[in-house]
Image (cartoon, rainbow, N blue to C red):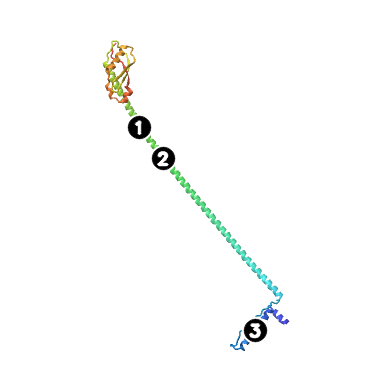
C-alpha cells in the first residue's frame, strides 16, 4: 500500500481518486464487453450504466500549495497584463485625447485666424468703399461747386447784361424823356412869347416864374405867379400871354407818364431877352 501510494506520488502527483475512477471504469468496460459477447443480440437489453461519483479526497499539501502559488502567480501575471493593457489603453486614450485636443486647438486657431483674416478683409473692403464713397462725394461736391460757380457766373453775366440793358434803356429813356420835356417846354415857351404883349415898363433882365396846371389834352387849368418880376404890369402881361397861347395841343403826343411827371404842373420861366432898355 505504501508502495502504491508512493508510486501515485511519483506519477506527477495524480490524486488517488483519479486512479480509482480509472480502475472502476476499466472494470465496467470489461464487463460490458463480456456481456455483449455471451448474449444474443435479440435478447440484448440495455442496462443503464451505474453512475459513479468521485469523491474528493485530500491531495498532497505541497502540490496544492505549489498549484495555489502558481495560480496566484498566473493571476498576478494576468492582473499585471490587464493592468499594463489598461494603462496602455489609458495612455493611448490620453494620447488620442491630447491629439484630438491639439487638433481641436489647431482647428480653432485656424478658424480664429481665418475669422481674423475675413474680418480684416471686410474691414479693408469697408474702408475702401468708404474711401470710394468719400471720393465720389468729394467729386460730386466739386462738380456741384463748379456747376454752382458756373451758374452764378452766368447769372451774374445775365444780370450785368440786364443791368446794362436796363441802364442803357433807362439812359435812352431818360434822354428821350429829357428831349421830349425840353422840346415841349420850348414849344410852350415859344408859344407864350409869340402872343406876349410887351408892356411899356418891360426891361431886359426882368423875369417872372409862372406855375401852370394843364390836362393831357394841353388845355390850361390854372396859371399862378410863383416868383414876381417886381413889375405888376410885366407879371400880368406874362400871365395873359400863357392864357393866350393855350391850349398846348403838342402835349397830346407825350406819353402819359412823361406828362404826369413834367407837365401836369409846370414852372415856366418868362424872361424875354430881346427887349430894349
Whichever of callouts 3 and 2 sits on the residue coming sooner in the sequence is 3
Q: Which is nearer the eye, 114 or 233?
A: 233
Could you tell me which secondary element the residue under label 1 belongs to?
helix
Can see residue 272? no
Q: Is residue 74 left or right of residue 218?
A: right
User: What label does residue 28 carry, if any?
Assistant: 3
Q: Is residue 197 left or right of residue 8?
A: left
State the residue position of label 2.
Answer: 144
Q: Position of residue 26 (x, y in %)?
A: 65, 83
CA distance separating discs 3 and 2: 130 Å
Query: Between tags 3 and 2, which lies in front?
Result: 3
State the residue position of label 1.
Answer: 162
Query: Between tags 3 and 1, which lies in front?
Result: 3
Quarter of the image where one finds residue 143? top left
Q: Quick one: label 1, few (<14), some, or many (20+) residues within 10 Å?
A: some
Image quarter where the N terminus lies is: bottom right
Name the residue rendered at 38%, 37% in the picture: 151
Quarter of the image where one finds residue 213? top left
Whichever of callouts 3 and 1 sits on the residue coming sooner in the sequence is 3
Q: Is residue 88 left or right of residue 124?
A: right
Amino acid at each position: 500500500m505504501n508502495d502504491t501510494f508512493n508510486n501515485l506520488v511519483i506519477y506527477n502527483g495524480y490524486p488517488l481518486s483519479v486512479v480509482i475512477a480509472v480502475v472502476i471504469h476499466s472494470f465496467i468496460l470489461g464487463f460490458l464487453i463480456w456481456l455483449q459477447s455471451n448474449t444474443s443480440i435479440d435478447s440484448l437489453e440495455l442496462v443503464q450504466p451505474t453512475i459513479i461519483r468521485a469523491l474528493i479526497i485530500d491531495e498532497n499539501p505541497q502540490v496544492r500549495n505549489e498549484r495555489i502559488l502558481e495560480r496566484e502567480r498566473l493571476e498576478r501575471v494576468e492582473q499585471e497584463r490587464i493592468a499594463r493593457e489598461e494603462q496602455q489603453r489609458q495612455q493611448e486614450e490620453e494620447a488620442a485625447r491630447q491629439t484630438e485636443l491639439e487638433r481641436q486647438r489647431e482647428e480653432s486657431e485656424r478658424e480664429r485666424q481665418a475669422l481674423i483674416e475675413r474680418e480684416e478683409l471686410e474691414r479693408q473692403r469697408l474702408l475702401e468703399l468708404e474711401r470710394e464713397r468719400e471720393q465720389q462725394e468729394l467729386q460730386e461736391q466739386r462738380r456741384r461747386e463748379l456747376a454752382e460757380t458756373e451758374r452764378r457766373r452766368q447769372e451774374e453775366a445775365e444780370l450785368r447784361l440786364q443791368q446794362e440793358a436796363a441802364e442803357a434803356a433807362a439812359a435812352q429813356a431818360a434822354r428821350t424823356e429829357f428831349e421830349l420835356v425840353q422840346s415841349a417846354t420850348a414849344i410852350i415857351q415859344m408859344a407864350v412869347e409869340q402872343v406876349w404883349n410887351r408892356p411899356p415898363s418891360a426891361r431886359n433882365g426882368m423875369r417872372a416864374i409862372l406855375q401852370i396846371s394843364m390836362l393831357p389834352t394841353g388845355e390850361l387849368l390854372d396859371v399862378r405867379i410863383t416868383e414876381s418880376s417886381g413889375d405888376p404890369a410885366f407879371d400880368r402881361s406874362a400871365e395873359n400871354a400863357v392864357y393866350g397861347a393855350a391850349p398846348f395841343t403838342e402835349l397830346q403826343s407825350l406819353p402819359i407818364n412823361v406828362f404826369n411827371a413834367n407837365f401836369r404842373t409846370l414852372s415856366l420861366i418868362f424872361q424875354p431877352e430881346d427887349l430894349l432898355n
